[in-house]
Amino acid sequence: MKNDLMALLEQIERADAVVVGGGSGLSSAAGYNHYHWMPYFQKCMQDFIECYGFSSPFAGFYHCYSSPEQQWAYYARYLQAMWDAPTGQPYLDLKVILDKKDYFILTTNVDGQFNRVFDKERICSYQGDFSYLQCCQPCHDQIYMNREITAKMNQSIQGVILPSDHIPRCEECGRIMIPWVRDDTFLEGTAWKESVSRYERFLEKYIIEQPDKKVLLLELGVGEMTPSIIKLPFWDMTVKNRNVFYACLNEKKSSAPEHIKEKSLYIAQDLAVTLHDLKVF
Ligand SMILES: [Zn+2]
């Protein structure tokens, strides 16, 4: 393991640019797992768990509620829990590791943790971000930071119900607002398109315009659920470009394709430990 860490450190040092691919495993390593209950969210959502028996925070989010008052009570509490969550140590460690590097972050995480630590212009939140709301249609191209309205809603929740007049409504069409995260009405509007363009521009600047520059693709906690966003494009860039190197850090062992064996490394252990060790080395 120590040799792998040293090899990775060397790759980071050599790299002219680092592209981070951040997945749910990174937030899990910070204590914020959305697919299974961990103590922080379990404590925040306790009364909803008792009422509905949800198996995870996301199960509560995607549950088909019988009324918007029930649905928005859960949303409001869940969003508040994310706003209140202390910034995860692995994110802070990553910031130190990337210090003085030119970097860009592509993430499928929607919990806003990257935004706490890194320059927003260098982040593409491909699946959206719970920090924002959109119209449920959506009828117009705008996302809205929800910090204040979330705090207000939380003062009004009664049991597991949010009274109707506190449910956020679209100022344009009057329909209910929803968190800006991937589902069938997800708003891929101006904000989303601009962040995707910034990501593409970053890749273009190094990989196409300066093929002699060394680029490290640093994949952190990406599972196998949506490989088409981070994992497969990272493999593809590694195969096609001489100066691209791929590093995959995950708690569990990940698939390691044969054709990029010479240009990749894998560290399978708790990401909190790996990032801490990389920071202090
Ligand atoms: Zn609307």
Image (cartoon, grey):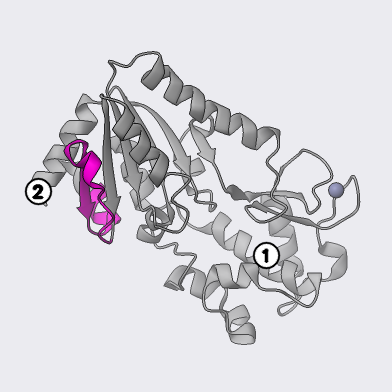
Residue at horizontal 26%, vertical 59%? 270
**Residue 257 drawn in magenta:** yes
Residue at horizontal 21%, vertical 36%? 263
Q: Is mark 1 within 8 Å of ligand 1?
A: no
Residue at horizontal 55%, vertical 58%? 82
Where residue 6 is drawn, which disc sits there? none
- Secondary structure under tag 2 reads helix
Q: Split into 4 quadrants, where in the image is the C terminus?
A: top left
How far from the left and from the top, in percent, is residue 43?
A: 51, 75
**Residue 61 drawn in magenta:** no
Where residue 75 is drawn, which disc sits there? 1
- Image quadrant of residue 125? top right
Q: CA distance from mark 1 to mark 2?
A: 43 Å
Residue ID for mark 2: 2
Between 175 and 235, the one nearer to me in the picture: 235
Tell me if 247 is positioned left or right of 116 in this view. Answer: left
Furthest toward the left, the residue is 3
Around disc 2, counting alpha carbons within 10 Å, would you say few (fewer than 14), some (14 to 19), or many (20 or more)?
few
Around disc 1, counting alpha carbons within 10 Å, would you say few (fewer than 14), some (14 to 19), or many (20 or more)?
many
Q: Is residue 172 visible?
A: yes
Q: Is residue 209 above or below residue 18?
A: above
Task: Say what amino acid the circle numbered 1 marks.
Answer: Tyr
What segment is highlighted magenta in the picture? 252-275
